[in-house]
Image (tube, rainbow, N blue to C red):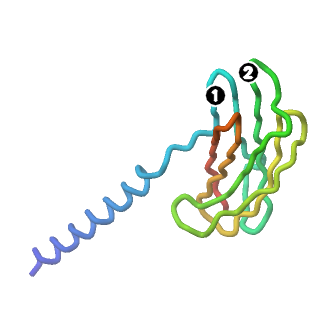
């Protein structure tokens, strides 16, 4: 009888370990900087602490290399939780100065969030992402 319970516990432990491993290792790689020799794009979180149901701010820097700021960019930024589906939340984006775009959005709950900025550049799409915690 003891060996059955021991085997059941071991099996449950192994299943939990596999699930945890897959959640960590199956997550797509987050790149907060893109550069290709013609274009440089970077995303940064403005505040160190994010809270549920409060605006969170980001800055996206876009430069045509060597050092020409990209103005009037066709850019979108969305928030989502990478480990669960609770929707996609679009940000309001304004060009705060040439090549610098400020975005604000509202995460709705605590947990790990991802901000993803997508730029349409010469008929291609360039993406940068950053992870942040909402406490």
Direction right: furthest residue: 97
Task: Name the residue located 71 percent from the left edge and 36 percent from the top edge.
Answer: 121
**Quadrant of the snapshot with the N terminus:** bottom left
Residue 89: percent from left, percent from top: 70, 63
Q: Is residue 29 left or right of residue 68?
A: left
Q: Is residue 23 left or right of residue 93?
A: left
Q: What x and y, as percent, mark residue 102?
A: 83, 46
Q: Are marks 2 and 1 in contact (CB under 8 Å)?
A: yes
Could you tell whether 124 is left or right of 63 in the image?
left
Q: Nearer the viewer, residue 55 or 100?
A: 100
Q: Nearer the viewer, residue 123 or 85?
A: 123
Query: Would you name the residue on which mark 2 appears?
Result: 65
Looking at the rendered structure, the secondary structure element under dot 2 is: loop
- Where residue 100 appears, as percent x and y from the top left, is 83, 37
Quarter of the figure with residue 122: top right
Q: Which mark is residue 35?
A: 1
């Amino acid at each position: 009888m003891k060996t059955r319970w021991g085997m059941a516990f071991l099996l449950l432990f192994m299943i939990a370990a596999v699930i945890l491993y897959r959640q960590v290792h199956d997550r797509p790689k987050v790149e907060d900087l893109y550069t290709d020799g013609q274009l440089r794009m970077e995303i940064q979180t403005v505040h160190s602490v994010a809270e549920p149901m409060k605006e969170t701010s980001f800055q996206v820097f876009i430069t045509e290399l060597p050092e020409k700021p990209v103005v009037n960019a066709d850019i979108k930024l969305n928030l989502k939780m990478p480990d669960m589906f609770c929707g996609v939340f679009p940000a309001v984006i304004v060009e705060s100065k040439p090549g610098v775009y400020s975005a604000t959005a509202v995460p709705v709950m605590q947990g790990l969030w991802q901000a993803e900025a997508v730029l349409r550049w010469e008929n291609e799409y360039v993406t940068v992402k950053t992870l942040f915690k909402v406490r």
